[in-house]
Amino acid sequence: MVDYGYGAAIAALIVALIVWPIVIIVFYVLGSLGLQKIFAKAAVRTPAVAWIPVYNILILSKLADLSPWVWLIGIGVDVVLGWIPFIGWIFSLIPLALTIVTVLRVNQKLGKEPVGFTIFGTLLFPIWALVVGYGQTQPWRTGDGVLARPFWHGWGAFFQDATTWGGVPFQGYPVIGGSTPPAAPPAAPPPPPPAA
């Protein structure tokens, strides 16, 4: 019997420690580039916020007419309760479901084929963001009567997007059981130059 030692295991560990972080960084960069273009299409004032790790998903959910609080609570529940033996995997389905809903709504707003692009975006999110961001799409559609109200708006005010963030355009749906965010103040003319 030949004793090979631990050489193969150490080599595999070194490759995993070098290759895996590179793959993660490449996917992060690709996803952020794609989200930056999607944010530009949606008229977000500063599309560069696509590079901020959690904030970019919150803005994407806001653009998809889903409350950012749903995402935060869903991720929190997954992190806290996902460790429970035998049933923890069920809580890991929450971010998956939120990803499907968010990607579906963004595809609808950009005029992409909802089913195929939603499956694509769920399985390969960074590549989907690049394809949708840099690809040919319709102009960003809001609640102007072209799109139907999202199905989760009938589930109560918790799922509806009622947050107003500076720089992220309101999507045009009044909150059921709530109020529409206030209109932006009119642009004021520049002040007259000082008298000499």
Image (tube, grey):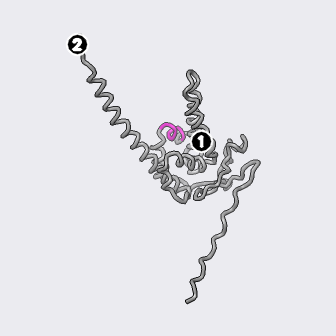
Magenta residues (range)? 118-123
Given residues 191 and 181, the one toward you in this image is 191
Q: Residue furthest right?
A: 177
Q: Quadrant of the N terminus?
A: top left
Residue 3 in the image: state x and y as whole percent.
24, 14
* Residue 178 at x, y percent in the picture: 75, 50
Q: Which mark is residue 2?
A: 2
Image check: 55 left or right of 6? right
**Badge 1 amino acid:** Leu
Q: Earlier in the sequence, mark 1 or mark 2?
A: 2
Q: Residue at x 55, y 89 (%)?
A: 196
Mark 2: amino acid: Val
The answer to whether 180 is drawn above or below residue 3 in the figure is: below
Residue 192's image quarter?
bottom right
Q: Is residue 146 left or right of residue 34?
A: right
Marking on residue 140: none
Label 2 sits on a secondary structure element that is loop
Write down the quadrant of residue 138 in the picture: bottom right
- Residue 131 placement (x, y as % from top left): 46, 47
Classify 63 as above or below 183: above
Q: Within 10 angstroms of label 1, few (less than 14), some, or many (20 or more) residues?
A: some
Left or right, 111 with respect to 127, comes to: right
**Dot 1: element:** helix
* Distance Cα–Cα, label 1 vs label 2: 53 Å
Q: Residue at x 52, y 42 (%)?
A: 117
Secondary structure mostly seen in the magenta stretch: helix
What label sits on residue 72 in the rendered view? 1
Furthest toward the top, the residue is: 1
Task: Reply yes or no: does residue 4 show up in magenta.
Answer: no
Q: Residue at x 52, y 54 (%)?
A: 39
